[in-house]
Image (spheres, rainbow, N blue to C red):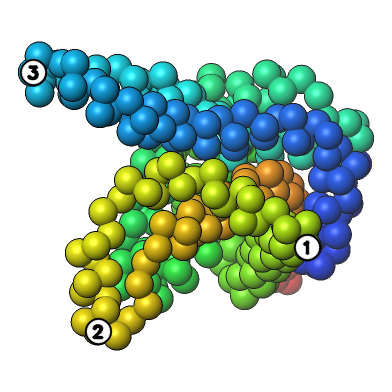
Amino acid sequence: MSKYKVKNNIFLILAEGIKIYFSNIDKFFVYMLFPVFGQIIGIILSFALPLGLADRIVAKSSSVTMAMLMILLLAMPGLLIFVKAFWDYMVAYVSLNSMTEGAVSTGRVYDFQSHNEVATRRSFQYVWLLICVGVLSSVASSIFFIIPGFVLWIYLILVFQVFTFEDDLSVFDCFKRSFSLVKGKWFSTFLMLALLVFFTIFIITEGVFVVFDYLNLTDKVSILFNFVTNKIPLDFCNQLLSYWHMPIITPDLISKTIFYSLISFVVMGLTLPIRSICWSLWYRDLAYADQQKNSRVPKSNKRSRKVRDDDMDV
């Protein structure tokens, strides 16, 4: 990032990240289009086709095994689309960091394939990194480790940036490097995370919901999911809820919940570039500070050695 000047201020970094994102929003939108919507399409196809044709398949199949096989075959195209989109979404966690470097250095975002290769040329190592991140996230979300796990996760939050920019490190060393960089800057890193979540997820998501409500589109779009929710047996659940004097669950309520979840997922996916850009800039600031700190150590040693030599001469 030859043109990037160290800011050492999370608010300036957030502003810079938003500037880079919106100045290249068309390219980032195109890049994230399939990873985000491909997952949604894949899930819908995986459930819609089997559920819509299940009755006919069961009626015409000669055995339960044959019916299950046919249902699985119907779900397979959607599963394949979902897996491909999910992998592309995971690759974006690394490639967007590389795009940030290109955007700062040249002012442009281009050649998506070369940025993707930052992860794909080290696929095995990257999959291992994702597994480690998944395991740590599961442990951190446990009720027994939620507080220490969250504290540790802030220390490890730059692991994708370290993997991108320091490709000579092993997976374990990536975690160690992230911990070392954030050490002493934990609160600033936490505040950066809070700002990014508030701006890119809460503010934008709520803004989209307001637009849908203003245009009276929420009910019209939610009703599209009724073909799924109408097949869910809710009688037993509602009997238990009525016994405990709790509001019952209706297909419309489930449809709206699915709608709100999908909108939140889309916003979170399409704004992933903002978060990746800001974390990349924050990584550069911390890496530069760490480099400056380490570069001062030899000079100090030299001065100490010179003092000792002068004392010996005396």
The image position of residue 94, as x and y in percent, is 60, 36
Q: 10 Å neighbourhood of mark 1: few (<14), some, or many (≥20)?
A: few
Q: Secondary structure at mark 2?
A: loop
Q: Secondary structure at mark 1?
A: helix
Q: Secondary structure at mark 3?
A: loop
Residue 197 location, quadrant: bottom right
For the point 59% across and 37% down, the residue is 36
Q: 10 Å neighbourhood of mark 3: few (<14), some, or many (≥20)?
A: few
For the point 24% across and 84% down, the residue is 244
For the point 86% across and 46% down, the residue is 22
Residue 111 relative to residue 258: left or right = right
Q: Which mark is residue 214?
A: 1
Q: Hey, which residue is sitting farthest bottom in the picture?
A: 245
Residue 119 versus residue 186 in the image, above or below: above
In the picture of the structure, the residue carrying the numbered disc 2 is 244
Q: What separation in Å lies between label 2 and label 3 (alpha carbons)?
A: 42 Å
Q: Residue 271: in sight, yes or no?
A: yes
Q: Hey, which residue is sitting farthest left in the picture?
A: 63
Q: 10 Å neighbourhood of mark 2: few (<14), some, or many (≥20)?
A: few
User: Which is nearer the N-term, disc 2 or disc 3?
Assistant: 3
Classify the position of the C terminus by image quarter. Answer: bottom right
Q: What separation in Å lies between label 2 and label 1 (alpha carbons)?
A: 35 Å
- Amino acid under disc 2: Trp
Q: Residue 208: in sight, yes or no?
A: no
The image position of residue 5, as x and y in percent, is 88, 52
User: Which is nearer the N-term, disc 3 or disc 1?
Assistant: 3
Residue 100 versus residue 274 in the image, above or below: above
Classify the position of the N terminus by image quarter. Answer: top right
In the picture of the structure, the residue carrying the numbered disc 3 is 63
Residue 309 location, quadrant: bottom right
